[in-house]
Each structure stands twice: as structure tokens, then as C-alpha cells.
Image (cartoon, helix red, strand yellow):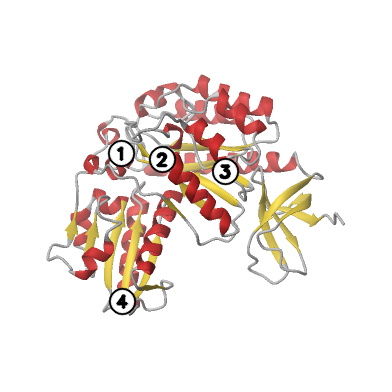
Amino acid sequence: MRKKGKVALYTLGCKLNYAESSIIAADMARKGYDIVDFEETPDIFIINTCSVTDFADRKSRKIIRKAKKINPDSKVIVIGCYAQLKPEEISEINGVNLVLGAGEKFNIDKYLSSMPEEKFISCEINDVEVFHAAHSSGDRTRSFLKIQTGCDYICTYCTIPKARGMSRSGTSEEIIENARGIAKKGIKEIVLTGVNIGDYGKGIDEDIDFLGLLKKLDMVKGIERIRISSIEPNLLTDEIIEFVAESRAIVPHFHIPLQSGSDKILQLMKRRYKRELYAQRVKKVNEIMPHACIGVDVITGFPGETDDDFIDTYNFINSLDISYLHVFTYSERTGTPAVSLPGKIPVEIRRERNAKLTNLSLKKKYSFYSKFSGETRKVLVEKSKEENKYTGFTDNYIKVKFNSNINIENDIIDIKLVEIDSDYLMKGNIVNNT
């Protein structure tokens, strides 16, 4: 087949974006394009954008401009959440040839064959009903497996329903088939990804929910680890927690968004739980899996968050037996109800609160890692950036660094955890089992 040109993809944002970029890259390769790195002077740049914050928008614009500097004669195609939400804004950036909304981002070759006069092809997001199965394939050790997309929730700060539409899922058959394909490549771990994966089962003619899918995936031969990327606390049932505890492959790692420890702020956010339920979920995990890692998302500086509300959040999180935080500074998103809420918090105060919670996260991480010092745990070894130096994660998401004189990438090996270094990594030594 005659090659059509060199294509480079640049992906920003979530694991779901990475999974979808992989399916786009595979499709472009099948259709005769060479997939190259961003710096290899490609003929076509495909930039898969994120729009979760204003910073994400700015980063997307920066990458778009960088692409045109690398090859001024290239075509630049922009897809992703930013493209769906603000296609006109992106189309006005110098050098952008095409902006494709969520309904068309998997049809790029069609537009390259005959570039339309209009710079952007948008769509009504809730008319997008097709689920495109996807998994990432750029990492030898793990792959992101898309099981669901879209969201039916109406959190007042969030643009995702407008960017990705209503909740819809892949059939269990196509997801299992994708998982088997990952296993055939020798990849040891899959990370289940989507927008709201606990809502799995919507949009398919099949009586199955997230727990049912987990049970099927747990039986896929060749996959040694299955990791749940993130799950809403109201959808993390006792039955799911209990199944993870006894499963063959699903690892003891939960990432559970909290967003605020104040019931007042949770109500303003239109979250579907109160902090009491959140505390119950954390307690349940720790009761039956005391070794489990629990990550928490939290937003600082939401409109109306007083000093007392922030202290309430800080103290609540501090009281929980959790392992780390992902801290986000609230960012106004055009078209969301939160923009018009009273009590706007000055940006400098938002950042101060972020810093305090980031420090709390380091304390929680150090405390969690310390519990396992001296233990031996299995580590999935990642590619080495330096000769004889390796890193990897335990099943319960402790990042470990260690030395080896032989190539052990993608092996799962026993590592004795020794001590935490200044970079908050666990130092370890390989255990000789022979």
C-alpha cells in the first residue's frame, strides 16, 4: 500500500483520551499512514485535547501552535473535549485546518481525503450514540481499556456531559474481546477507563452492570492485573468492594472522587452523596482490604467555599484512612451553572488551599507507604530510563525503584520494600526466589 503521509498524535488529559488516540492511530495505520513521533516533522498533526480546566484549554492551544512550528506546511486537526466545546475558538487559531467534534473524530481519513471548506465540523453531542471500543497500546506493561463514555450526572462545575454526551457503554463481548487482544500482546495489566465507569451498562441491549463486567474480565486468561481507574462513591457498592477483595486479578486500588468534605459544598456541586456515605465506603474498603490503596479527588476554591468549609474538608480528609490526593484548583468553565453561583473565591486563596491539601496528600502518601516498609510485594516492572535502574508499581499502587543487571521490563517480580526516598518513591531490592 502506498503511504499517504506521516501522522503524529498528541494526547492531552485523561486515560480515556489515550485509549481513543490509540484506536485512531491504529485506524490511520491500517489506512496507509505512517504513525510517527510529534517531533519527526509529520505531514499531519492530530491533537486530542482536554478541557477539564482553563489550564487544559491553554495547554491545548500551546500544543497546536507548537505543531505548526515543527512543520509549517502540515495539516493540523484538533479533536477531543476542547474541540467539541469550543470549535469556533479553536478554528480561529492560526494554522488549524480542521476541528472535529465527538461525532466525527473517528472519521479523520474521510476528511483528509477531501478537506472541507469549513474549518470545523461540530455536532449536537447528545446525538452521538455510537460507542467506539478502544484500548491504548503504547506501553508494554499496561493498557487503558475503554468500557464506557459520557455521563448522565449534572455536576455544576463540569463540562464533560457537553463534551462527551450521555452515558453509554460497550457490550461485554467487545470489551472482553479487547481484553483478550491486550493479553495476546503480552501486556500484564489493564486499567478500566471511561467517564463514569461505575455507570457501566447503559446504552447496550444487555442485562449487565459494572460488577457483572468485572466478573467476566476477572476470568480473562493472560491478564494478571485489572485496575479500576476511578469510580463514584455512590456507585462503589459493598458487593463491588467484596468482589475485588476475593478476585483473581482486580488489584486493591480504588480511586474515589470526593471533591469536597463539606456537605454544603457537595450540595452546591450537585454531587450524588454526602460525606457520611463517602466515609462508609472508605471504611468498608479498609475493613476487608487493609492493604488497599485509596486515592481521592478534591476541588479547592469552589464558589461559596468559606474558610470554615475548607477547614471542614481538610479535617474530614485528614480523618480518613486514605493514601493520596489529586487536588484540583476550581476553574470557571463557560456554560456551567457554577459560573453564576455567588461567593467567588479569589484565585490566590484557591491556590493557597490547593497547597495545603497537596501537603496533606504527601503526608498521607508517606504514611501509606510506611506501613509496607520491610514487606515483600509483587511489582510490575516498567521500562528503564537509566541503565540497570527500574521502577514499577505494586498491586496496591506503591511506586518502587530498584536495580537490576538484567532486562526485567514487563516482569512481575518480588521486591522487598526498604525505605522511602526524598522523591516519595519506595526503594526496594529484588528478592531471589531461586
> Is the Cβ of the residue at disc 2 closer than 8 Å to that at disc 3?
no
Q: Nearer the viewer, mark 2 or mark 1?
A: 2
Please tell me which of labels 1 and 4 falls first in the chain: 4
Q: Which residue is mark 3?
A: 227
Look at label 2 and name its amino acid.
Thr
- Of all residues shown, which one is farthest toward the right? 434
Hey, which quadrant is residue 30 in on the image?
Answer: bottom left
Q: Nearer the viewer, residue 334 or 287?
A: 287
Hey, which quadrant is residue 147 in on the image?
Answer: top left
Residue at x 63%, y 64% (from the top left corner): 383
Measured as percent of width and height from the top left, residue 327 is found at 49, 42
| Left or right: 408 as drawn, with respect to 31 | right
Query: In the rendered image of this protein, does residue 104 appear above or below residue 65?
Result: above
Identify the mark at residue 171; answer none if there is no mark.
2
Q: Which residue is mark 4?
A: 4
Count of marks, rendered view: 4
